Amino acid sequence: MFAQFAVAGVVAGTLLLVMNLLDLPSALAISVIVLVFVESAVGYLLLRYALGPTDMIARCLMYVRGEPLLRPLPDRGDPASVNSGLSLLLTTILDGTTKKDAQPTASTDQQPLRDLLAALPIGFVALDSHHHIIAANSLAPICTAPDGQRRIQLDFANASESLDVWLGQVSGNEIEAEKIWSHIQNVAPDQPDRRIFDVIAHYRQDFPSGIATVVITVDRSAEYEGQEDNADFVALAAHELRGPITVVRGYIDILDQQLGAQMTPDQHALIDRLNVSAKRLSSYVNNILNASRYDHKHLKLRPTETMVTNIIDEVKNDMDLRASTQNRSLVWQIPPELPTVAADQSSISEVLTNLIDNAIKYSHDGGQIEISAALQDDFVAISVCDHGIGIPPVVASNLFSKFYRGHRSRDMVSGTGIGLFISRGIIESHGGQIGVESTEGQGSTFTFTLPIFSTVAEALASDNHSLIRDDLGWIRNHSRVRK
C-alpha cells in the first residue's frame, strides 16, 4: 500500500512541476493530483478485494506445510465464504492435505479412523461456530431444509430446551460445555422412518479444524418404542376411566344437592373432599390424555378472543374448594381492565388448574396463594405465587420435562410428573411462554403469558387455528398464533 501511494506521490509531484513550467491553472493541477491519489486508493481497494481469497488460500497452504503464520487461519464458516464456495475449497485444503512434518502415509493412516466413525452404531455430527453442519456420518439424523441447508432433524418438543437454544446460551460464553438429552425423536410418531435417540452435545471453543460442537446421537428406538407402547396403553386406560369418573362426580353432585339440607357439617366436609378428589383424578386423566396427544402432534387447540376473567371464573370455585379442604387460601388479584387475549379457554383453564393445584400441594398448612395478572408488552402475564417449600435450582431447570419429579417432591406429595409438561406445550402452542422463579424454603412463582388478541387476530384468521411452526416446516393439528 505504501509503495503504491509513494509512486502516486512521485507522479503527482512530476505533474505539478510540468504544470508549473507550462503555467497551467493551479485549480487544474490540484484536480489532477487529487484524481491520481483517488485512483491509487480505489486501485488498492480493488486489488485487496480481488486478492482476499488468494490470501486466505495462501494462509491455509502455509498452515498445512507447517509454516509459521503471521495471522490466524480464515473462518471457513464465514457466510461470504460459504456463499461463494470458497469455504469448501479451504476445507478441502485443510482437511485433505498433510502437513510438511507429517509422515507420507498420514492421509492413509487417517482412513481407519474414518472407517471406524462410519462403522460405529452412533450418529456423529460436527458443527462450526455458526451451528452449520460441516461433517456427519450416515447414521446421523440429517435432513435438507426448504432453504437448502442441511440440518439436524431432531424434535426437542419434550425437552426443557432445544439444541439450538442450548448452543445459543453456551457459544462464546463458555470455554467448554456438555448437554445430554434422552428420548428425542426425529419425526412425529405417526411419520415413517421415525427413530428415537439419546443425544449428547459437546461444545468447546478451541476445537480443531473449524469445529465448534460435536453432536452424538444414539439410536434407542427399540427400547423407547416399547416404553411408548406402555404409555399408549396408559393413555387408553385413562381414556376408559373418564366415563366412570364422570359418573362418580355426577353422583357426588346429586348427593350434595339432594341431601345437603340434612347433612351435618362433618358430612358436608366429607362430600367436599370426595368432590375434590374426583375432580383431581379427572385432572390427572386429562393430563395423561393431553400429553399423549401432544407427543403424537394431535393436540388440537382453538384460540379465540376471551377475557382473562372468563378463564378465572371457570376454575375459581373449584380451586377455592380444593384449597379450603387442604387448609390453604387463595387470593385472586385479576384487574378487570386487562385487554382480551387469544386463548383456548378450556386448555388454559387446565394450565391454571395444574399450577394452582401444585401450589396447594407444595404450600405449608394454612398457607396463602396469590393468583395475579398484569399487562406485559403484547402479552398478559398470569402468575401463581405460593410461599411453600420452594424449588432447588437444579430441579427448576427440568421441571417442564415429561415425567420429571424431584426426589423431594416424590417423597412428599403424589403426582404424575406431566402436569407442567403439558402446561408448557399448551402455552407454547398459544405463542406464549411459561417459567418459574423460586427460592428454596421461601416459595415459587409460576408465570405464563398469553398474546393480546389484537396482536394475533390476523394470524388467527389466516392460520385456521390448525398449524404450529417448527424449525423445519409446518406440523398439522397444532396451533401457534405467533411466528
Image (cartoon, rainbow, N blue to C red):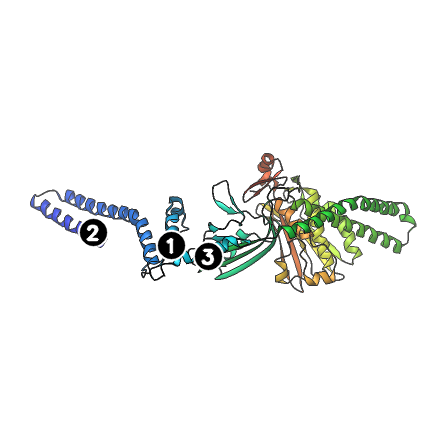
Distance between mark 3 and mark 2 Cα atoms: 55 Å
Mark 1 or mark 3, earlier in chain: 1
Q: Is residue 356 above or below residue 25?
A: below
Q: Nearer the viewer, residue 456 or 152?
A: 152
The residue mark sitting in front, 1 or 2, is 1
Categorize mark 3 by other alpha carbons within 10 Å: few (<14), some (14-19), many (20+): few
Check disc 1 and report the residue beneath it: 94
Check disc 2 and report the residue beneath it: 5
Q: Amino acid at mark 1?
A: Leu
| Residue 476 image point, x, y percent | 61, 39
From this viewpoint, which residue is outermost toward the left? Answer: 21
> Could you tell me which residue is drawn at 67 percent across and 63 percent down?
442
Categorize mark 1 by other alpha carbons within 10 Å: few (<14), some (14-19), many (20+): some
Distance between mark 1 and mark 3 Cα atoms: 19 Å
> Could you tell me which residue is drawn at 49 percent across and 50 percent down?
136
Mark 3 or mark 2, earlier in chain: 2
Please indicate whether residue 321 sits to the left or right of residue 338 in the image.
Answer: right
Q: Amino acid at mark 3?
A: Pro
Q: Is residue 436 above or below residue 86?
A: below
